Image (cartoon, rainbow, N blue to C red):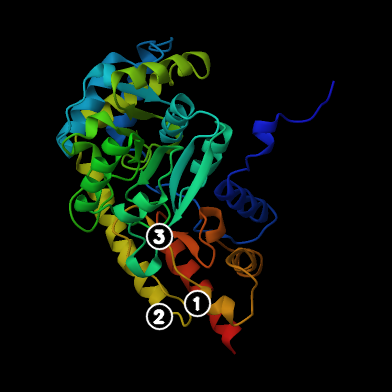
Amino acid sequence: MSAGLSERIARISFSSTMEVAARAEQLRRSGAEVVDLSVGEPDFPTPEHIKQAAIRAIHEDFTRYTPAAGMRELREAVCERHAADFGTRYEVPECLITSGGKHAVFNFIETLVNPGDEVIIPAPYWVTYRDAVLLAGGRAAILPTAPGDGFALRAEEVRKRLSPATRMLIVNAPNNPTGALLNAAEAAELVELAASRGFWILSDECYASLVYDGEPFSIASLPGAARSVLVAGSLSKAYAMTGWRIGYGLGPAQVIEGCVRLQSHSTSNPNSIAQRAALEALRGPQDCVTNMREEYRRRRDYVIRRLRDIQGVTVHSPGGAFYAFPGVSALLEEGRWRSSAVLAERLLEEVGVACVPGEAFGAGGHLRISFAASWQALEEGLDRIASFLARAHR
């Protein structure tokens, strides 16, 4: 019997962001002073009232299985919170609790994408989309967006990329890694296009609460969206709950039932204690979300200002999420580095700053820098980057 991997596993990659974080940790263990600006993880602690809800769950022995779709009360709370934030009207059968937002994305793709189906993925894209599609046997149809247009997704460009095999369009707004938002008018055109051409829109809203320019928005709130829009959401970023692994999916009841069927044979229910904590997060005070968002806004403004002071670097101000995505193509054209991947490697190995190269997101010539880091880390990291690049110009 062959000991090789299955074909479906062999065609997917290891998460690039996780690889960078692992290398940074390896250097740190060897004694290097590493500033990690690679990981998309809040540096805030989980708010106290959420932690206390988990502690109460333990003392109350809430440690058994829940339904595979998650606690009914938590599903109700997700629908209520999404309605309050975005004006949608979801019911419990249209909601599924998952083990993180990534799990919701995976569930939807596995449930709806058949071998040979095309999934349009605007680039730059979050690293998991492409591999999740490949794992399902689908084809990733990459749709580049333009840095000069702020990486905005345009409905007309989606229209041009459609084919008879198109099954799904993935929309991520605010975008990871660019922070780009989705224009409401463009979103309305996308909903109309999906209805007329018969494809799904998977809206990844894991950063939906972290919007700095304008108001939070969900494409699912538009008229007619209920027939074609699926929502993958998470509590990880908004409530600083990355390790708790609670996300959710929203969509037509039939699709959600399919996802529950899949989940019942894969992960079963999400962690019961984390579900109780998530219930408190959604129904408890929301000032923690507002406070974190305002702090990220201040960090964003600082990071963008510092990057714009570096010769050869261009960067737009992200409208949401907590990443800067500076362009370094001018530096690469000077021949000092072959690619942004090589530049990112040099930054890590030579000056101890971890960031993720644009190649991981289908957009070479860029770096992703997370500003979900302490002020000390941001100041030190940007000092090192600026000094390293200044030396390269000499």
Query: Callout 1: 10 Å neighbours few (<14), some, many (20+)?
Result: some
What is the secondary structure assignment of the residue under circle 3?
loop
* Residue 206, horizontal then vertical, whole percent: 35, 41
> Would you place residue 274 above or below residue 355 in this image?
above
Can you see residue 388? no
Q: Residue at x 22, y 26 (%)?
A: 79
Q: How far is disc 3 from disc 1 in space, using C-alphas?
A: 27 Å
Count of numbered badges drawn on the protein:
3
* Residue 373, horizontal then vertical, whole percent: 42, 56
Can you see residue 158? yes
* Residue on which the image places disc 1: 386
* Residue on which the image places disc 3: 145
Describe residue 386's horizontal placement relative to residue 174 as left or right.
right
Question: Considering depth in this image, is 86 or 29 the residue closer to the camera?
Answer: 86
Q: Residue furthest right?
A: 1
Q: Amino acid at mark 2?
A: Asp
* Residue on which the image places disc 2: 309
